């Protein structure tokens, strides 16, 4: 696809989107702006290649060759194995479907484009962290809602499923299953140092009030009204056909593997029963991203580096004081130790034992406090994204073999205009040539 054709495609998209008036937020160059993540129109239109291609190492004989989708919440790029930019999408949390169409977040809307980047539909939605799809094209995403809970305003996760035509067909609210959820996370390593274990015969409020700061996390910058996040789901996998289901029925095809960050565990939701039917617990206290069932029947988990406290900023301190006044801690627990490294760890769900792990040498050389992902590729390699904007570092994505040998490494050469440091990618996914050719004919 040549440069002029690519620009024309996005100009067409601009015209289409500017004609849609359902969005109530501000519009910049035809695109609806997300209230938290304003679109960078200069980045969108300027498709010129960077001076450096960003690829520092590439062993074509051992890598899982394809194209790589790099995601930064509100925008995404598609690069080839040599780092050449093939496409730029003004879409966050993108998911490329087998037919080459793409779904994701654009401002306040869930959108779907065909392989030629023509808009098929859009629908207003609140979404965060993950948008994915199943074999039938149904779309799954994480949303949230606020409730007054224990005297404070708290945010709770909501799972939503849309049909391939964009109609909402299912919702699951964690707030409606709060007692079940508390029972699950109470068994995690993160909450193991609370003085009194969870007792289902007593109220969950009594359990939480031991140390509220273990459950409530300040979000936003407005301290006039402190808002806290209580649950923080950050990934969804629609389970494929797998052999684990023969021994653990919760792993049946179509159930959802969800990440319960920061509670150091993940679980499987059966949407037909509305119950979390199985839970996997990490042996150490760490936040996590992208637990994924592999074709081998193991679960691959990206385990973040984690500070000893989430209450770091001035705004956090103000809202922590408010939380302490509203829900005084009865038995404050000991702060856990910091974990200043990232690991990509593979667990056997039948035994909950570690079967493979990748870390840097030394371990502290690889950190990712708030972002990051890992996925197992068809050839058995693992694609790892360790980018983090928290420390002001740029995007780094690399691929290693099962023997932990580096076969591909990409470091973003582009600058984040707002922060003036290299792009920090939220997640990375490898897309097969078979699918990529439907979006970019002739690609090799």
Image: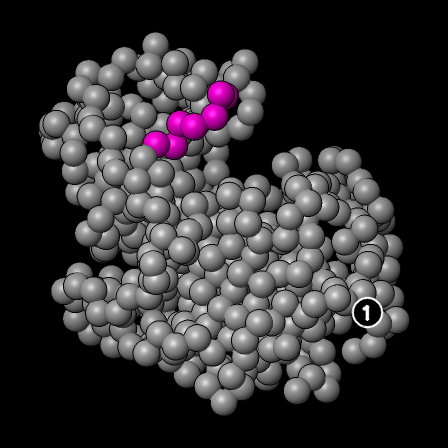
Q: Write down the quadrant of residue 326 in the picture.
A: top left
Q: Quadrant of the C terminus?
A: bottom right
Relative image position of residue 37 (x, y in whole percent): 65, 41
Q: Write down the quadrant of residue 27 in the picture.
A: top right
Asked if residue 103 shows in the view, the reply is no
> Most extreme residue toward the top, as rendered?
325
Relative image position of residue 178 (x, y in whole percent): 29, 35
Please report the residue visible at 40 percent of the width from the left and 27 percent of the height from the top: 311
Asked if residue 219 shows in the view, the reply is yes
Q: Quadrant of the N terminus?
A: bottom right
Taking the magenta stretch, the answer to whether it contains residue 425 is: no
Q: Is residue 64 above or below residue 37?
A: below
Residues 34 and 390: in front is 390
Relative image position of residue 109 (x, y in whole percent): 65, 47
Q: Secondary structure at mark 1?
A: helix
56 on left or right of 382 = right
Please report the residue visible at 81 percent of the width from the left and 42 percent of the height from the top: 28
Q: Write down the quadrant of residue 102 in the picture.
A: bottom right
> Most extreme residue toward the front, as rendered?
362
* Magenta-highlighted residues: 309-315
Q: How is the image coloured?
A: one colour
Residues 143 and 325: in front is 325
243 on left or right of 325 = left
138 on left or right of 113 = left
Please report the residue visible at 16 percent of the width from the left and 38 percent of the height from the top: 192
Residues 173 and 226: in front is 226
Residue at image mark 1:
6
Dominant SS of magenta comes to loop
Q: Is residue 55 above or below residue 130?
A: below
């Amino acid at each position: 696809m040549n440069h002029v054709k690519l620009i024309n495609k996005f100009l067409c998209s601009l015209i289409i989107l500017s004609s849609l008036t359902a969005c109530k937020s501000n519009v910049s160059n035809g695109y609806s702006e997300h209230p938290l993540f304003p679109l960078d129109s200069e980045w969108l239109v300027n498709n010129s290649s960077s001076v450096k291609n960003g690829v520092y190492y590439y062993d074509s004989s051992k890598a899982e060759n394809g194209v790589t989708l790099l995601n930064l919440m509100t925008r995404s790029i598609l690069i080839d194995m040599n780092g050449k930019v093939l496409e730029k999408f003004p879409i966050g949390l993108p998911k490329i479907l087998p037919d080459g169409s793409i779904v994701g977040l654009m401002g306040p809307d869930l959108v779907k484009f065909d392989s030629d980047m023509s808009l098929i539909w859009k629908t207003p939605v609140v979404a965060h962290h993950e948008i994915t799809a199943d074999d039938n094209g149904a779309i799954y995403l994480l949303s949230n809602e606020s409730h007054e809970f224990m005297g404070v305003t708290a945010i709770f996760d909501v799972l939503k499923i849309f049909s391939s035509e964009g109609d909402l067909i299912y919702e699951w609210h964690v707030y409606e299953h709060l007692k079940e959820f508390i029972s699950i996370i109470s068994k995690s390593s993160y909450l193991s140092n609370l003085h009194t274990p969870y007792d289902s015969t007593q109220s969950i409020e009594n359990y939480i009030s031991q140390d509220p700061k273990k459950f409530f996390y300040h979000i936003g910058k407005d301290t006039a009204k402190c808002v806290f996040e209580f649950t923080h789901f950050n990934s969804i996998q629609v389970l494929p056909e797998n052999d684990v289901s023969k021994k653990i029925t919760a792993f049946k095809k179509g159930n959802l593997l969800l990440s319960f960050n920061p509670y150091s565990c993940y679980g499987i939701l059966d949407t037909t029963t509305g119950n979390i039917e199985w839970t996997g617990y990490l042996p150490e206290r760490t936040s996590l991203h992208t637990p994924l069932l592999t074709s081998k029947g193991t679960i691959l988990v990206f385990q973040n580096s984690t500070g000893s406290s989430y209450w770091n900023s001035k705004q956090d301190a103000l809202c922590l004081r408010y939380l302490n006044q509203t829900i005084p801690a009865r038995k404050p627990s000991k702060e856990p130790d910091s974990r200043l490294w990232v690991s990509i760890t593979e667990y056997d769900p039948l035994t909950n034992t570690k079967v493979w792990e990748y870390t840097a040498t030394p371990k502290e050389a690889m950190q990712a406090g708030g972002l990051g992902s890992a996925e197992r590729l068809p050839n058995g390699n693992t694609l790892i994204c360790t980018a983090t904007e928290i420390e002001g570092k740029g995007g780094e994505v690399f691929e290693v073999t099962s023997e932990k040998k580096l076969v591909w490494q990409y470091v973003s050469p582009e600058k984040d205009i707002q922060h003036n440091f290299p792009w920090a990618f939220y997640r990375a996914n490898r897309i097969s040539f078979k699918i990529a050719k439907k979006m970019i004919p002739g690609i090799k």
